[in-house]
Amino acid sequence: MAWKHIIPTVTMRSWLLASVLLLSLTGCAKNYVVLLPDENGALGKVMVTSSQGQVLLDQKNQGAFIGGSRSDTFTLSEEKLQATFGAALAASPKKPVSYLLYFETGQAVLTEASQSEIPKIKEDISQRPGVDVAVIGHTDTKGTASANYALGLSRAKQVLALIRDAGVSTERLSVESHGEKNLLVATPDDTDEPRNRRVEVIVR
Amino acid sequence: MNFKPFFPAGALALCLATTAALADETVIGYIKTVQGDAMVVATGHSVKAVPGTPVKATDVLKTGKASSLGITLSDNTLLSIGPDTEFVVDEYLFNPSQDELKLGASLGKGSLNYVSGMIAKLKPSAVSVRTPTGTIGVRGTHFVALVVPD
């Protein structure tokens, strides 16, 4: 049994006791889900569906058992959150960051401002364990769709050449072109738009 | 590898049976964080998880005692699991231009921390996490879940 490795402390005993009481109150339900705020403090919603019906969570640290006879919700204290989920929370990967680099019209030449962003991107790449990077080239709608696909790809490859010595393994690097099909700013066809001439670098 | 699951694999297999047909070779994300013993178990073989290990749909992520693991999917979803956990992403589609969006996962046992990515943002109804006693539907952002084995 796993328990024999644990030296019971007063806190742990009371936690165990509380768990036993909680279990006895809830029938067989012991699986649960708890809604947490995101990093900006915003709350989403979670819907729990089981043979017992549905429960909606929309409050901070609000939890519900999954299945079982209890359909009410509870609030998980920060202390219990850390005790039960501390390891999983601490293992959460660093949030991915998207960088946008802009180009001179009709060419695979970075603007000066964007060129100066490159060291920051490389620094970010070098600090993420197991980093994977997606480089996606885009164009404005000036010219034909097929020429713009090729231009988007050559822009992406241009950026790739600038960041590839930052320490990303080749198999975790992807390069693609969306040509003129994924505009940042909607324009009619054949429109010069600097904000659409870009390469997106997603560092995960 | 001699990595025998002590959790009844049949129960997990049952959860996954409906969707296993969708398994393919596409890499859906990479391991980013590892503490202690963590494995990526595919049909027929398993590898020790290290930062950078690729993960495909239907690969089972497993951790031992005092261990944890974190993975970032290609839609920027962040998933991390605590000790004694079995977790699998069994359905994954991220192709926004074709409106092909799906993230179906199963928590067989243990603890999960979920932070939503693009799929939940673009199509919240496409995200669900199954547990042995019910299903968690996600309408954005952040949750934790615990499954205690019988």
Image: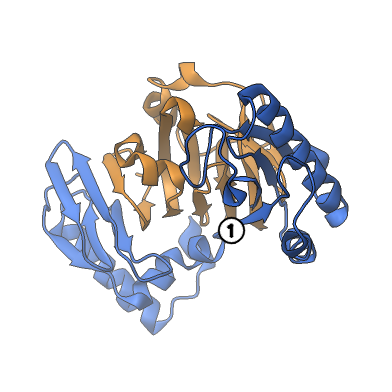
Chain colours: A blue, B orange
Q: Is the residue B114 above or below the residue A54 in the image? A: below
Check the residue under mark 1 and report the chain it is in.
Answer: A
Residue occupying image coordinates x 42% and y 45%? B109
Residue closest to the eye, A55 or A154: A154
Percent x, y for residue B94? Answer: 49, 33
- Residue at 47 percent of width and 16 percent of height: B21
Q: How many marks?
A: 1
The residue sitting at the bottom extreme is A10
Q: Would residue A173 appear left or right of A68 to someone viewing this image?
A: right
Q: Position of residue A169 (x, y in %)?
A: 81, 44
Examine the image and state in which quarter residue A127 appears: bottom right
Task: Judge by depth and name the residue closer to the eye, A125 or B15.
Answer: A125
**Going by the image, does A113 lie left or right of B96?**
right
Q: Is residue B1 visible?
A: no
Left or right: residue A24 versus residue B50 is left
Residue A143 location, quadrant: top right
Residue A58 image-quadrant placement: bottom left
Amino acid type at circle 1 is Pro
Residue farthest to the top?
B21
Rendering coords of residue A66 (x, y %): 24, 47
Can residue B86 be seen here? The reply is yes
The residue that mark 1 highlights is: A93
At horizontal 62% and vertical 35% (from top left) the residue drawn is A142
Residue at 28 percent across and 40 percent down: it is B135
* Mark 1: secondary structure: loop
Residue B62 image point, x, y percent: 57, 44
Q: Residues within 10 Å of mark 1 (few under 14, many from 20)?
A: many
